């Protein structure tokens, strides 16, 4: 097997050759499925996800209890392909971790979309994970942003997300530990990390999830790197959206 | 903050991302495919101080600090490369001779390639760790160059290319790039091309060297390279001799002396379906040609007799054996066979006509066989086996000395390379053939060697010389030898560890304000009359005690233990170091600490008159020593006095002392006696091991006398309460963490362990030894009394102790509850809690207890069963090694104390062989062998009655020795020829007899 994360200190290089403050290759497409109201495909390194949006839809049938009340309801479904991970484990939809991610995504977008414009309706995000290599929640959030833009649902700003970690484990008293941006799965397994999402290029944090333990002193550095990474993510997402916009204009113009 | 992304346009990685695919098989046998991205870059510096361009793009860490460049601008030159040179070793070069790379006399400015580092990690983790250590030492100037991440040096594996070939090519490409890059750098700085240091690849792979020459790369073999250095002789020895051996011998089509090993798959299937057995190979301390292996399928150990059956297995190796047919089963030997006397004058260089078994050995073995066949069926033959393969070598570095007789006289002065035998201190290790040019110099010194290989065509293993520890019998060399032999980590603590200590150093105090976070969750016990009782001069005080009467007539008793877990946080450098060391090692004149002195002897140590953090166990106990309730808490205490056992004893015994502290000790004493009685009633064993103390001259620390330790009641006092604390804590942490509690068990010895002793007692004394429970054993040991010989009981206890299993640490989830039992203490559950300064297990127990009482959350490392098992495995080994090292140290100093003296002492025959017997001398706590040939010159005739354990000699001397006989021996000290140890020598003066 190759080296482990402890080798970072040898030359300030991570396991895949990145520096501490570098994102992996992030590429995305939108309107990948014509039939959906909105759709996107996004890769962060080897983490690959698809998002389709349906809605806002009015509830079927009259009568009965109307959902949501004055605002639209954001529903999130995540399905993780059995082949996406290393060990081919089938995760059920009710897996605790998966439903927590779905909850985080739903809450984040409930606060960002102008859901008051669509009373009594539902906006459904279907997320499919094709390949996992760390920063899964961040990739899902970013893909959702793109698909929602594609669906034309108004939002305050992009939700941009990425992970940040620290080069040394929880309890070592390593004051000099560097923060790391955008962790892959090996790094996630060995190091403490958090997922952060910001509203556009601002410093407003709209989601923050951390499941590992880290010394409090390192948190600030991690968060700063994460927020900075979100700004980089926004530029990339914005580039994708604008390129798509230009193409539509060009196509309709001719 | 900058990002490569923005500076390089929309998709900067398109050409610079590559993937690496690994296939990994998991423990459960699944195969996983792992794909990893690889980001190739151009800003990985060459780290040469000659280069400016790399400096501009050199990486900075998150605080903006630039990593200084490592490689010298004026590296050392050699004959071949007078302009100076950088070294780039390949993986094999490091595998074969890392020792040489660690020398301070050569091997500076070394570039370690990522490819090589990864390969080395796969091949040998210990070597990898040593290499990483080297890259961190500033003076050696080792630089890790991540060639697989640099665009120019990244190499894609071609179709049909093996991984090895790909890696070799990657190494060559990196060397080539370095050479070109340095030339450019020097030119850019306006320097002369002639002055550019050469970049030299070192490889022992012929093909790689040929390809390198073809590509125009500077390359040479390790041997060639070292030959060009000034101190070549010394280094050449370290350059593993193994390869050379193979080459010269293959040329001769050597005759194979040993059977070929089975293939791995054949061994595995065999083990699975029960035709073969796997286990750890052990050599008998009395007979180097007799090994044994314990396998689950047999009650009794399998015997492995003779060199051919042992088939190159070395003490400690994990081997696979095949059981021999029943007609070849034998009894364990009753004869002492020592390698040195058998093959005394062999020539280490002789390679022709070498037989596996020398004529003498053959004769010795034949006699053995005859004896078995002639015996009545009443004998107890044991199954025998032969080694068919080695699963894992357990080779380490061995301390020993050069067999002077193997050094040719002419070569003593010349620096000609020659082969010599190294005789290891550990008698169970065969002698090792070492090629050296320094035979003359290292003669008479303690030296360290490693085994490199043991081929079928070589009678002895081949190894190489690592370093000399110094003149034999000097205190420094002998102590270091002992530490190395028992694998005790004795180097000073590295900086990373010392950095974990509190910044205040010795100035640290318990925070005066109770609002300080240090006080959180701590109870203030400073008002209690607490004291500690330890051996004289004890500096690392782990434990202190108090007792006071309660209004209801009961007593409150507290055991306060140093709060080490407050200072040592899980997984930091200090914790890692402590977990590796596992225990503090006590030698006669030296202590090798598990934790840095600052903690061990000051901040953690429960010294008197100062406030200290503690972890307290508090009980309410009735006057009948029944426990009403118990609780645990972190606390702050202030010990009133640190007593020695003797001082405490005097105070307790002196009726005029009526102060609170003395009264508390009297209470403790009263309770401890009741506790002890209860334990004894429950079947706790009182075993014995010879304990002696070496008295030292305080100025010179030369040993002046040996005394047996005296037992005081205050010792049992402390012991009883430590046992109480340990058992209470064990129950508590097991309740909180049923799967992962750190516990200690002592297995019940299998009945067969006592067969020999029981038979001996029956035959010689008509005593029945009952062993079905610890209670029965304890009772029958009490009955082993010889009215005329008061020492007889102790002697039997010493022998019984050797039949016991050794106690071990374990993780509660790995055993069923009934297996938790501590046989010797007759306790259902037990752990170690009371000595966290000097035992790592206790530190883990502290962390678990702290979590169990909700003082702090439990760190992941002490929550994972797998990690805990690894910790247990290590500390079990360390614990055993520490005990053995301590014993060996006493043995050495007893020898020193007797130096130049001749004493006559009484002793007892505790083992009788057909050609000698072992005598134990209680006064010094030592035992030694008296062989027939030690009795008289020429060696007397002998007759051995194995059934009755009687050895009778006639001819040159008439002696009749029976087992358990009292004898008088003359003790003097001699240098043992075989191991180079100064040892006591016993000569038989007379047999006093027993009946
Ligand atoms: Zn350079």
Image (cartoon, rainbow, N blue to C red):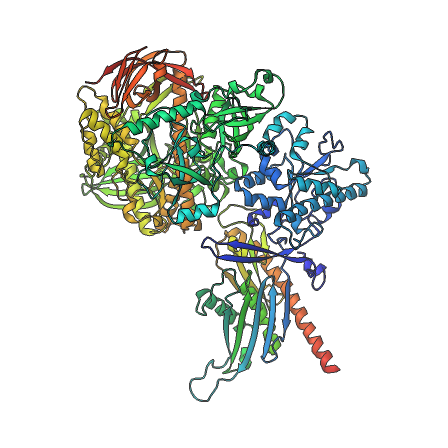
Residue in front for this viewpoint, A240 or B557:
A240
Question: In front: B368, or B848?
Answer: B368
Q: Residue at x 63, y 20 (%)?
A: B415
Tell me which residue sits at (63%, 21%) in the image. Answer: B416
How many numbered discs sit on the rendered protein?
0
Q: In the figure, B32 relative to B373: above or below?
A: below
Furthest residue to the bottom? A62
Q: Is residue A187 left or right of residue B863?
A: right
Examine the image and state in which quarter residue B640 appears.
top left
Going by the image, does B110 lie left or right of B772?
right
* Vertical order, B649 against B510 (above or below): above
Where, quadrant-wise, is the C terminus of chain A in this rendering?
bottom right
Nearer-the-camera pick, A187 or B520: A187
Quarter of the view holding residue A139: bottom right
Residue B914 is left or right of residue B322, and the answer is: left
Report x, y in % for residue B936: 35, 11
Q: Position of residue B871 (x, y in %)?
A: 42, 43
Q: Is residue B651 visible?
A: no
Q: Is residue B856 left or right of residue A37?
A: left
Residue B35, image quadrant? bottom right
Q: Is residue A135 visible?
A: yes
Percent position of residue A43, x then y: 61, 65
Residue A230 place in picture, x, y as percent: 61, 63
């Amino acid at each position: 097997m190759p080296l482990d994360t402890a080798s970072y200190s040898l030359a300030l290089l991570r396991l895949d050759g990145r520096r501490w403050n570098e994102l992996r290759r992030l590429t995305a497409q939108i309107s990948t499925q014509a039939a959906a109201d909105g759709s996107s495909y996004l890769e962060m390194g080897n983490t690959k996800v698809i998002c389709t949006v349906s809605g806002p839809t009015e509830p079927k049938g009259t009568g009965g209890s109307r959902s949501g009340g004055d605002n639209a309801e954001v529903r999130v479904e995540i399905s993780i392909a059995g082949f996406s991970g290393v060990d081919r484990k089938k995760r059920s939809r009710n897996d605790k971790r998966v439903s927590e991610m779905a909850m985080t995504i739903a809450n984040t977008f409930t606060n960002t979309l102008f859901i008051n414009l669509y009373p009594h309706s539902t906006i459904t995000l279907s997320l499919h994970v094709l390949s996992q290599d760390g920063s899964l929640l961040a990739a899902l959030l970013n893909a959702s942003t793109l698909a929602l833009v594609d669906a034309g649902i108004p939002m305050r700003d992009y939700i941009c997300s990425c992970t940040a970690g620290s080069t040394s484990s929880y309890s070592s008293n390593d004051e000099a530990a560097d923060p790391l941006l955008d962790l892959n799965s090996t790094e996630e397994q060995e190091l403490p990390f958090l997922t952060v999402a910001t509203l556009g290029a601002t410093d407003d944090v709209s989601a923050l999830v951390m499941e590992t333990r880290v010394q409090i002193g390192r948190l600030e550095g991690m968060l700063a790197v994460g927020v900075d990474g979100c700004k980089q993510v926004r530029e990339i997402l914005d580039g994708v959206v604008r390129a798509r916009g230009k193409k539509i204009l060009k196509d309709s113009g001719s | 903050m900058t990002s490569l992304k923005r500076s390089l346009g929309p998709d900067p990685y398109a050409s610079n991302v590559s993937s690496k695919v690994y296939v990994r098989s998991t423990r459960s046998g699944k195969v996983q495919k792992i794909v990893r991205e690889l980001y190739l870059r151009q800003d990985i510096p060459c780290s040469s101080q000659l280069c400016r361009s790399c400096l501009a793009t050199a990486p900075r860490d998150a605080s903006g600090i630039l990593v200084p460049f490592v490689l010298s601008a004026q590296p050392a030159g050699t004959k071949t490369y007078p302009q100076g040179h950088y070294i780039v070793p390949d993986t094999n070069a490091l595998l074969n001779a890392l020792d040489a790379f660690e020398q301070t006399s050569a091997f500076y400015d070394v570039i370690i390639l990522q490819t090589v580092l990864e390969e080395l990690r796969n091949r040998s983790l210990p070597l990898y760790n040593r290499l990483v250590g080297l890259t961190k030492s500033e003076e050696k100037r080792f630089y890790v160059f991540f060639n697989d991440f640099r665009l120019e040096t990244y190499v894609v594996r071609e179709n049909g290319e093996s991984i090895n070939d790909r890696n070799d090519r990657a190494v060559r490409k990196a060397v080539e790039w370095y050479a070109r890059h340095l030339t450019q750098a020097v030119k850019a700085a306006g320097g002369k091309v002639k002055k550019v240091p050469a970049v030299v690849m070192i490889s022992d792979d012929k093909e790689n060297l040929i390809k390198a020459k073809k590509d125009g790369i500077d390359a040479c073999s390790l041997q060639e390279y070292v030959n060009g250095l000034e101190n070549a002789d010394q280094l050449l020895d370290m350059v593993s001799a193994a390869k050379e051996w193979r080459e010269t011998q293959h040329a001769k089509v050597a005759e194979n002396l040993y059977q070929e090993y089975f293939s791995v798959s054949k061994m595995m299937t065999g083990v699975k379906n029960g035709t073969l057995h796997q286990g750890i190979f052990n050599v008998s301390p009395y007979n180097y040609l007799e090994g044994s292996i314990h396998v689950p399928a047999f009650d009794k150990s399998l015997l492995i007799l003779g060199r051919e059956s042992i088939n190159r297995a070395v003490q400690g190796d994990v081997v696979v054996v095949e059981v021999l047919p029943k007609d070849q089963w034998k009894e364990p030997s009753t004869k002492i066979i020592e390698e040195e006397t058998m093959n005394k004058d062999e020539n280490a260089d002789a390679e022709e006509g070498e037989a596996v078994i020398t004529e003498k050995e053959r004769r010795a073995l034949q006699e053995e066989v005859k004896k078995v066949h002639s015996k009545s069926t009443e004998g107890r033959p044991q199954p025998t086996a032969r080694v068919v393969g080695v699963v894992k070598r357990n080779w380490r570095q061995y301390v020993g000395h050069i067999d002077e007789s193997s050094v040719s006289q002419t070569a003593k002065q010349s620096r000609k390379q020659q082969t010599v035998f190294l005789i290891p201190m550990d008698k169970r290790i065969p002698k090792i053939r070492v090629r050296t040019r320094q035979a003359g110099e290292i003669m008479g010194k303690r030296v360290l060697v490693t085994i490199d290989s043991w081929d079928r065509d070589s009678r002895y293993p081949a190894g190489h010389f690592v370093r000399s520890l110094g003149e034999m019998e000097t205190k420094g060399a002998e102590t270091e030898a002992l530490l190395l032999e028992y694998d005790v980590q004795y180097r000073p603590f590295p900086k990373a560890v010392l950095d974990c200590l509190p910044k205040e150093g010795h100035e640290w105090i318990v925070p005066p304000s109770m609002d300080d976070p240090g006080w959180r969750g701590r109870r203030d016990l400073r008002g209690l009359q607490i004291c500690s009782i330890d051996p004289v001069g004890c500096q690392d005080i782990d434990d202190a005690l108090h007792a006071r009467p309660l209004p209801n007539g009961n007593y409150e008793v507290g055991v306060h233990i140093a709060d080490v877990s407050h200072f040592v946080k899980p997984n930091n450098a200090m914790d890692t170091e402590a977990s590796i060391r596992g225990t503090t090692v006590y030698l006669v004149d030296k202590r090798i600490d598990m934790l840095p002195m600052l903690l061990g002897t000051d901040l953690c140590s429960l010294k008197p008159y100062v406030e200290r953090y503690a972890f307290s166990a508090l009980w309410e106990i009735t006057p009948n020593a029944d426990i009403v309730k118990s609780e645990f808490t972190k606390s702050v205490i202030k010990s009133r006095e640190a007593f020695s056992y003797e001082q405490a004893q005097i105070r307790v015994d002196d009726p005029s002392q009526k102060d609170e502290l003395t009264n508390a000790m009297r209470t403790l004493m009263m309770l401890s006696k009741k506790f002890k009685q209860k334990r004894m009633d429950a079947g706790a064993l009182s075993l014995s091991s010879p304990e002696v103390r070496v008295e030292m001259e305080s100025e010179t620390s030369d040993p002046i006398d040996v005394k047996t330790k005296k037992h005081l009641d205050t010792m049992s006092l402390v012991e009883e309460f430590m046992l109480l604390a340990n058992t209470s804590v064990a129950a508590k942490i097991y309740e909180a963490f049923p799967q992962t509690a750190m516990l200690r068990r002592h297995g019940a010895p299998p009945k067969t362990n006592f067969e020999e002793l029981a038979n001996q007692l029956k035959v010689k004394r008509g005593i029945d030894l009952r062993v079905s429970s610890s209670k029965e054993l304890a009772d029958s040991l009490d009955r082993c009394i010889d009215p005329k010989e008061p020492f007889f009981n102790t002697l039997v206890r010493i022998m019984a102790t050797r039949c016991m299993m050794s106690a071990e640490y374990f993780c509660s989830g790995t055993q069923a509850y009934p297996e938790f039992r501590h046989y010797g203490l007759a306790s259902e559950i037990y752990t170690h809690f009371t000595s966290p300064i000097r035992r790592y297990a206790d530190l883990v127990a502290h962390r678990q207890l702290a979590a169990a009482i909700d003082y702090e959350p439990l760190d992941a490392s002490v929550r994972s069963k797998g990690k805990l098992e690894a910790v247990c495995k290590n500390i079990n080994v360390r614990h055993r090694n520490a005990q053995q090292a301590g014993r060996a140290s006493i043995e050495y100093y007893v020898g020193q104390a007797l130096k130049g003296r001749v004493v006559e002492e009484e002793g007892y025959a505790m083992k009788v062989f057909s050609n000698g017997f072992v005598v134990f001398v209680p006064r010094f706590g030592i035992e030694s062998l008296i062989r027939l040939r030690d009795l008289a010159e020429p060696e007397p005739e002998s007759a051995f009655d194995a059934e009755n354990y009687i050895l009778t000699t006639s001819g040159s001397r008439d002696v009749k020795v029976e087992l358990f006989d009292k004898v008088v021996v003359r003790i003097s000290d001699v240098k043992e020829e075989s191991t180079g140890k100064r040892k006591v020598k016993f000569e038989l003066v007379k047999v006093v007899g027993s009946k």
